[in-house]
Image (cartoon, rainbow, N blue to C red):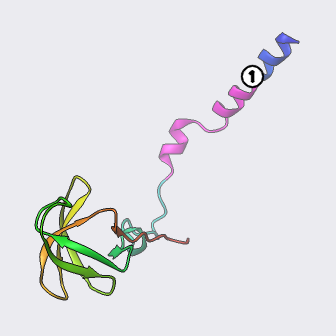
Amino acid sequence: MRINRAALAVLALATLVIPGSAATASATPAPAALPLARACDQPGPWMIGTSAVNIRSRATTNSTVVGVLYKSHRFTVHSSSGGWHYITDLTTGVKGWVSGTYVYRDVRMCLD
C-alpha cells in the first residue's frame, strides 16, 4: 500500500511539471490589445469612512484640532506616516493630519 501512495505522488508531481515547460510559458507574448496601465487598475480617490474626521495639527490624538473633514469634502493626501495622513481639505483649504483609521483609498477593479 505504501508503494502505491508514493508512486501516485510521484506521478502527480510529474504531471504538474511535464505539460508546460518554462521556455514555452515565458515565450508567449502578452496580448497587444490590452494597455499596460488601465484606469480601472489605478487606485481610486481617497474616501472618508465615517461622517466626519478631525483634522489635527500633528499626527497624534492629543494634538489640537484645526478643522473637520466631512464625508462630502474633497481632499488631497500629501504624505503618510505611522497610520496618519497629511491632507489638504480642498473645500476649506485647511491642512493637517487625519487618522488612517477613518480615511482610506477607494478600490477599483477591472471586470474583464
Depth check: 36 or 80 in front? 80
Horizontal and vertical percent position of residue 2: 83, 11
**Residue 26 belongs to the span the image colors magenta:** yes
Q: Amino acid at mark 1?
A: Ala
Q: Quadrant of the N terminus?
A: top right
Identify the magenta region: 9-28
Residue depicted at x 48% and y 46%: 27
| Residue 108 place in picture, x, y as percent | 44, 71
Q: Which residue is mark 1?
A: 9
Regarding residue 27, the answer to whether it shows in the image is: yes
Q: Is residue 13 above or below residue 36?
A: above
Q: Is residue 45 visible?
A: no
**Dot 1, crowdedness within 10 Å: few (<14), some or many (≥20)?**
few
On whether residue 34 falls in the magenta region, the answer is no
Where disc 1 sits, the SS reads: helix
Residue located 19% across and 73% down the image: 55
Question: Residue 55, relative to residue 80: is it above or below?
Answer: below
Q: Residue 52 in the image: x percent, y percent?
A: 31, 79
Q: Nearer the viewer, residue 74 or 52?
A: 52
